[in-house]
Amino acid sequence: VHATVKTTYSMYIGFSTSELLGMEESKNPIHIAIMNFYRELIFVSFKVITKQLIYYYICRWAQYNSTNGFCRHTPECLASFACALNDWFDFSRESYKIGKVAVDLMKKYDVVSDCAPFVYLAVYSSVALLVEPYQSCADMLQRGYEFSMSKGDTDLASRNLVLMVQNLYFGGTKLSVLKKNISSRINLETQRSHQILLPFWLIFEDTVFTLIGDQEMLSPNIEADLTEGGTVSSDYLDFLCHQ
Protein backbone atom coordinates (compact mmCIF):
# COMPACT_ATOMS: atom_id res chain seq x y z
CA VAL A 1 0.00 0.00 0.00
CA HIS A 2 2.86 2.35 0.84
CA ALA A 3 4.30 2.00 -2.67
CA THR A 4 0.85 2.42 -4.26
CA VAL A 5 0.25 5.68 -2.39
CA LYS A 6 3.65 7.01 -3.45
CA THR A 7 3.06 6.00 -7.08
CA THR A 8 -0.34 7.71 -7.10
CA TYR A 9 1.10 10.81 -5.46
CA SER A 10 3.74 11.06 -8.22
CA MET A 11 0.95 11.14 -10.84
CA TYR A 12 -0.49 14.36 -9.37
CA ILE A 13 2.50 16.18 -7.88
CA GLY A 14 3.57 17.62 -11.24
CA PHE A 15 0.29 19.47 -11.82
CA SER A 16 -0.44 22.92 -10.48
CA THR A 17 -3.85 23.81 -9.07
CA SER A 18 -4.79 25.71 -12.23
CA GLU A 19 -3.79 22.77 -14.42
CA LEU A 20 -5.92 20.34 -12.39
CA LEU A 21 -8.87 22.71 -12.51
CA GLY A 22 -8.36 23.15 -16.24
CA MET A 23 -8.94 19.46 -16.99
CA GLU A 24 -11.88 18.91 -19.30
CA GLU A 25 -14.77 16.80 -18.06
CA SER A 26 -15.07 13.44 -19.80
CA LYS A 27 -18.54 12.46 -20.99
CA ASN A 28 -17.51 8.93 -21.98
CA PRO A 29 -20.22 6.68 -20.47
CA ILE A 30 -17.85 3.72 -20.02
CA HIS A 31 -15.31 5.88 -18.19
CA ILE A 32 -18.03 7.37 -15.97
CA ALA A 33 -19.38 3.88 -15.21
CA ILE A 34 -15.94 2.61 -14.17
CA MET A 35 -15.36 5.66 -11.99
CA ASN A 36 -18.75 5.07 -10.37
CA PHE A 37 -17.83 1.42 -9.80
CA TYR A 38 -14.71 2.49 -7.89
CA ARG A 39 -16.84 4.98 -5.94
CA GLU A 40 -19.35 2.35 -4.87
CA LEU A 41 -16.58 -0.15 -4.07
CA ILE A 42 -14.87 2.30 -1.74
CA PHE A 43 -18.09 3.43 -0.06
CA VAL A 44 -18.95 -0.19 0.72
CA SER A 45 -15.37 -0.99 1.74
CA PHE A 46 -15.46 1.55 4.57
CA LYS A 47 -17.81 -0.81 6.42
CA VAL A 48 -16.22 -4.19 5.80
CA ILE A 49 -12.44 -4.11 5.20
CA THR A 50 -9.23 -2.74 6.69
CA LYS A 51 -8.02 0.82 6.28
CA GLN A 52 -4.95 -0.29 4.32
CA LEU A 53 -7.07 -2.04 1.70
CA ILE A 54 -9.38 0.97 1.48
CA TYR A 55 -6.37 3.18 0.77
CA TYR A 56 -5.26 0.75 -1.92
CA TYR A 57 -8.66 0.99 -3.65
CA ILE A 58 -8.65 4.78 -3.32
CA CYS A 59 -5.22 4.97 -4.94
CA ARG A 60 -6.29 2.71 -7.79
CA TRP A 61 -9.32 4.94 -8.27
CA ALA A 62 -7.12 8.04 -8.36
CA GLN A 63 -4.70 6.36 -10.78
CA TYR A 64 -7.51 5.45 -13.15
CA ASN A 65 -8.83 9.00 -12.90
CA SER A 66 -5.43 10.48 -13.75
CA THR A 67 -4.86 8.12 -16.69
CA ASN A 68 -8.32 8.22 -18.28
CA GLY A 69 -9.50 11.74 -17.55
CA PHE A 70 -11.64 13.70 -15.14
CA CYS A 71 -15.41 13.25 -14.91
CA ARG A 72 -18.37 13.93 -12.62
CA HIS A 73 -17.02 11.46 -10.03
CA THR A 74 -13.56 13.05 -9.89
CA PRO A 75 -14.36 15.40 -6.97
CA GLU A 76 -15.18 12.46 -4.69
CA CYS A 77 -12.14 10.58 -6.01
CA LEU A 78 -9.73 13.45 -5.27
CA ALA A 79 -11.30 14.15 -1.87
CA SER A 80 -10.77 10.49 -0.93
CA PHE A 81 -7.19 10.53 -2.19
CA ALA A 82 -6.43 13.74 -0.28
CA CYS A 83 -7.53 12.01 2.95
CA ALA A 84 -5.45 8.93 2.18
CA LEU A 85 -2.40 11.06 1.35
CA ASN A 86 -2.79 13.08 4.52
CA ASP A 87 -3.23 10.01 6.70
CA TRP A 88 -0.51 7.91 5.14
CA PHE A 89 2.15 10.61 4.74
CA ASP A 90 2.75 14.04 6.21
CA PHE A 91 1.98 15.79 2.92
CA SER A 92 -0.32 18.43 4.37
CA ARG A 93 0.18 21.01 1.62
CA GLU A 94 -0.38 18.57 -1.22
CA SER A 95 -3.32 16.96 0.58
CA TYR A 96 -4.93 20.35 1.06
CA LYS A 97 -4.29 21.35 -2.56
CA ILE A 98 -5.91 18.19 -3.91
CA GLY A 99 -8.80 18.51 -1.47
CA LYS A 100 -9.50 22.10 -2.52
CA VAL A 101 -9.34 21.08 -6.18
CA ALA A 102 -12.03 18.49 -5.42
CA VAL A 103 -14.25 21.22 -3.94
CA ASP A 104 -13.71 23.57 -6.89
CA LEU A 105 -14.29 20.84 -9.47
CA MET A 106 -17.75 20.20 -8.04
CA LYS A 107 -18.71 23.72 -9.07
CA LYS A 108 -17.03 23.50 -12.46
CA TYR A 109 -18.71 20.20 -13.36
CA ASP A 110 -22.03 21.30 -11.79
CA VAL A 111 -22.23 18.29 -9.47
CA VAL A 112 -22.32 20.09 -6.12
CA SER A 113 -25.67 18.62 -5.06
CA ASP A 114 -24.43 15.08 -5.85
CA CYS A 115 -20.89 15.28 -4.47
CA ALA A 116 -21.02 17.87 -1.67
CA PRO A 117 -22.10 15.55 1.18
CA PHE A 118 -19.06 13.31 0.81
CA VAL A 119 -16.55 15.89 -0.49
CA TYR A 120 -17.24 18.36 2.32
CA LEU A 121 -17.08 15.53 4.85
CA ALA A 122 -13.74 14.24 3.55
CA VAL A 123 -12.04 17.61 3.03
CA TYR A 124 -13.27 19.65 5.98
CA SER A 125 -13.00 16.94 8.61
CA SER A 126 -9.43 16.09 7.65
CA VAL A 127 -7.03 17.92 5.35
CA ALA A 128 -8.54 21.42 5.65
CA LEU A 129 -8.14 21.35 9.44
CA LEU A 130 -4.39 21.70 8.92
CA VAL A 131 -4.86 25.05 7.18
CA GLU A 132 -8.29 26.61 7.80
CA PRO A 133 -9.89 27.71 11.10
CA TYR A 134 -12.15 25.24 12.91
CA GLN A 135 -15.14 27.52 12.54
CA SER A 136 -14.65 27.73 8.76
CA CYS A 137 -14.45 23.93 8.50
CA ALA A 138 -17.53 23.60 10.71
CA ASP A 139 -19.47 25.91 8.38
CA MET A 140 -18.61 23.74 5.38
CA LEU A 141 -19.59 20.56 7.25
CA GLN A 142 -22.89 22.25 8.04
CA ARG A 143 -23.36 22.72 4.29
CA GLY A 144 -22.50 19.04 3.79
CA TYR A 145 -25.18 18.18 6.32
CA GLU A 146 -27.76 20.35 4.53
CA PHE A 147 -26.95 18.82 1.12
CA SER A 148 -27.15 15.32 2.64
CA MET A 149 -30.56 15.99 4.15
CA SER A 150 -31.84 17.44 0.88
CA LYS A 151 -30.95 14.11 -0.76
CA GLY A 152 -32.39 12.04 2.08
CA ASP A 153 -28.96 10.58 2.95
CA THR A 154 -29.24 10.48 6.74
CA ASP A 155 -25.99 8.52 7.15
CA LEU A 156 -23.76 11.17 5.53
CA ALA A 157 -25.87 13.89 7.15
CA SER A 158 -25.18 12.48 10.61
CA ARG A 159 -21.47 12.10 9.92
CA ASN A 160 -21.18 15.68 8.68
CA LEU A 161 -23.05 16.88 11.76
CA VAL A 162 -20.94 14.90 14.25
CA LEU A 163 -17.73 16.32 12.82
CA MET A 164 -19.23 19.81 12.60
CA VAL A 165 -19.96 19.75 16.35
CA GLN A 166 -16.46 18.42 17.02
CA ASN A 167 -14.96 21.35 15.11
CA LEU A 168 -17.21 23.81 16.92
CA TYR A 169 -16.01 22.37 20.22
CA PHE A 170 -12.34 22.69 19.29
CA GLY A 171 -13.02 26.12 17.77
CA GLY A 172 -14.22 27.53 21.08
CA THR A 173 -17.99 27.70 20.60
CA LYS A 174 -19.93 28.45 23.79
CA LEU A 175 -20.57 25.25 25.70
CA SER A 176 -24.17 26.25 26.39
CA VAL A 177 -24.81 26.32 22.64
CA LEU A 178 -23.17 22.92 22.14
CA LYS A 179 -25.09 21.48 25.08
CA LYS A 180 -28.45 22.29 23.50
CA ASN A 181 -27.36 21.00 20.08
CA ILE A 182 -25.96 17.74 21.44
CA SER A 183 -28.97 16.93 23.63
CA SER A 184 -31.39 17.35 20.73
CA ARG A 185 -29.20 15.18 18.49
CA ILE A 186 -29.06 12.36 21.06
CA ASN A 187 -32.86 12.33 21.28
CA LEU A 188 -33.14 12.27 17.49
CA GLU A 189 -30.51 9.54 16.99
CA THR A 190 -32.22 7.43 19.66
CA GLN A 191 -35.59 7.78 17.92
CA ARG A 192 -34.01 6.78 14.61
CA SER A 193 -32.12 3.88 16.22
CA HIS A 194 -29.00 5.21 14.50
CA GLN A 195 -26.68 3.39 16.89
CA ILE A 196 -23.41 3.69 14.94
CA LEU A 197 -22.92 7.39 15.63
CA LEU A 198 -24.73 7.58 18.94
CA PRO A 199 -21.54 6.80 20.98
CA PHE A 200 -19.90 9.92 19.56
CA TRP A 201 -22.83 12.07 20.68
CA LEU A 202 -22.61 10.48 24.13
CA ILE A 203 -18.92 11.36 24.31
CA PHE A 204 -19.61 14.96 23.30
CA GLU A 205 -22.39 15.17 25.85
CA ASP A 206 -20.23 13.77 28.65
CA THR A 207 -17.39 16.16 27.78
CA VAL A 208 -19.51 19.29 27.52
CA PHE A 209 -21.68 18.58 30.57
CA THR A 210 -18.59 17.78 32.64
CA LEU A 211 -16.97 21.08 31.68
CA ILE A 212 -20.16 22.94 32.50
CA GLY A 213 -20.50 21.03 35.77
CA ASP A 214 -23.92 19.65 34.90
CA GLN A 215 -23.32 15.88 34.88
CA GLU A 216 -26.62 15.08 36.55
CA MET A 217 -28.33 16.18 33.31
CA LEU A 218 -26.63 13.50 31.21
CA SER A 219 -29.05 11.45 29.11
CA PRO A 220 -30.22 8.61 31.41
CA ASN A 221 -29.51 4.94 30.67
CA ILE A 222 -28.48 5.45 27.06
CA GLU A 223 -25.07 3.86 27.54
CA ALA A 224 -26.66 0.97 29.42
CA ASP A 225 -29.20 0.45 26.65
CA LEU A 226 -26.42 0.36 24.06
CA THR A 227 -24.16 -2.05 25.90
CA GLU A 228 -26.95 -4.36 27.04
CA GLY A 229 -28.36 -4.52 23.53
CA GLY A 230 -24.99 -5.68 22.22
CA THR A 231 -24.80 -2.87 19.64
CA VAL A 232 -21.80 -1.11 21.14
CA SER A 233 -19.58 -2.71 23.76
CA SER A 234 -18.42 -0.83 26.85
CA ASP A 235 -14.82 -1.45 25.74
CA TYR A 236 -15.59 0.27 22.45
CA LEU A 237 -17.12 3.25 24.29
CA ASP A 238 -13.99 3.43 26.47
CA PHE A 239 -11.85 3.37 23.33
CA LEU A 240 -13.85 6.19 21.74
CA CYS A 241 -13.59 8.25 24.92
CA HIS A 242 -9.83 7.73 24.92
CA GLN A 243 -9.60 8.83 21.29
Image (spheres, rainbow, N blue to C red):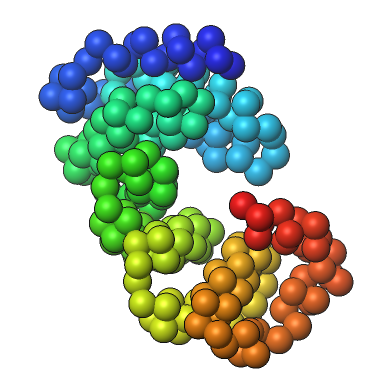
Q: Is residue 177 above or below residue 18?
A: below
Nearest to the observer: residue 122 or residue 219: 219
Q: Is residue 145 above or below residue 126?
A: below
Return the x and y of residue 67 as percentages of the image width and height: 35, 11
Quarter of the image where one finds residue 74: top left
Q: Quadrant of the N terminus?
A: top right
Q: Is residue 87 visible?
A: yes
Return the x and y of residue 195 as percentages of the image width and height: 68, 66
Return the x and y of residue 18 as percentages of the image width and height: 13, 24
Quarter of the image where one finds residue 235: bottom right
Q: Is residue 34 visible?
A: no
Q: Is residue 164 above or below residue 111?
A: below
Nearest to the observer: residue 156 or residue 83: 83
Q: Is residue 36 left or right of residue 206?
A: left
Looking at the rendered structure, the number of numbered marks drawn on it comes to: 0
Nearest to the observer: residue 183 or residue 25: 183
Return the x and y of residue 36 as percentages of the image width and height: 45, 32
Residue ID at (50%, 58%): 159
Residue ID at (55%, 85%): 213
Nearest to the observer: residue 14 or residue 93: 93
Residue ID at (62%, 26%): 52
Residue ID at (57%, 87%): 214
Q: Is residue 153 left or right of residue 196?
A: left
Q: Is residue 197 left or right of residue 17?
A: right
Give the residue furthest to the bottom: 216
Quarter of the image where one finds residue 140: bottom left
